[in-house]
Amino acid sequence: SLIIYAYESKLITQNLDTTVSQSDIEQYYNDNLENFQLKDNIVKVYYARFNDDIKPLKKIRNFFYAESEDARDSLDKYIQQYSNLYFLDNETWILFDDVLKYVPINTYNKEAYLQNNRKIEITDEGHIFLVNFTDFKIKDGISPLSFERETIRQIILNKRKLRIINDMRDEVFNTALENNDFELY
């Protein structure tokens, strides 16, 4: 078994095409939508924590909730200077539960909270948290492609690995059959 495993691993290393195109990923996603049901709520968000006594808090608040690119650039400068906890990548889907690890949002119904709160401010133990949810998806809905991209890539690669192994086993069997290298009992 160990020898077979080592041989198969080496064969995969030599023959596996690890390039997975965007169109392959999209095709797999579209063909298997029923397999991409969300098990948790996900969000696109940016948040930051500040001491509640900093002087430029009003200016930061204005930049934080503004939509312009200039405001975001200014916000980045203030955050680097005044915040020690922040997440500013509002293009990436993340689990809502991961946000809750860092931001003290108290809610019993996460789905209702996300549907009713986009721009929030929370004061907690001498800190103020500014949070801006730019998008969200509720669990049991269809997961967005951007959230599943790496999972799909791994699925495609695993299918390719299995195909290489199965082709090798079929080839060995057919060669043995042609050469009468085995007997059936």
Image: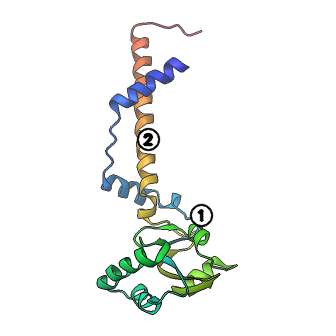
Residue 35: image x %, image y %? 52, 57
At label 1, the amino acid type is: Lys
Name the spot of residue 164 as percent of width and height, x first: 40, 31
Question: Eyeballing the image, is 132 above or below 167?
Answer: below
Give the mark nearer the N terminus: 1 vs 2. 1
Q: Which residue is mark 2?
A: 159
User: Residue 25: which quarter of the image?
Assistant: bottom left
Q: CA distance from mark 1 to mark 2?
A: 24 Å
Which type of secondary structure does the marked residue at label 2 adopt?
helix
- Frontmost of labels 1 and 2 is 1
Disc 1 marks which residue?
39
Residue at left offset 46%, top offset 67%: 93
Query: Residue placed at 41% from the left, 91% from the top?
Result: 59
Q: Seen in the image, is 144 located left or right of residue 74?
A: right
Q: Check disc 2 and give the amino acid type.
A: Lys
Q: What residue sits 55% from the left and 65% below the top? A: 38
SS assignment at label 1: loop
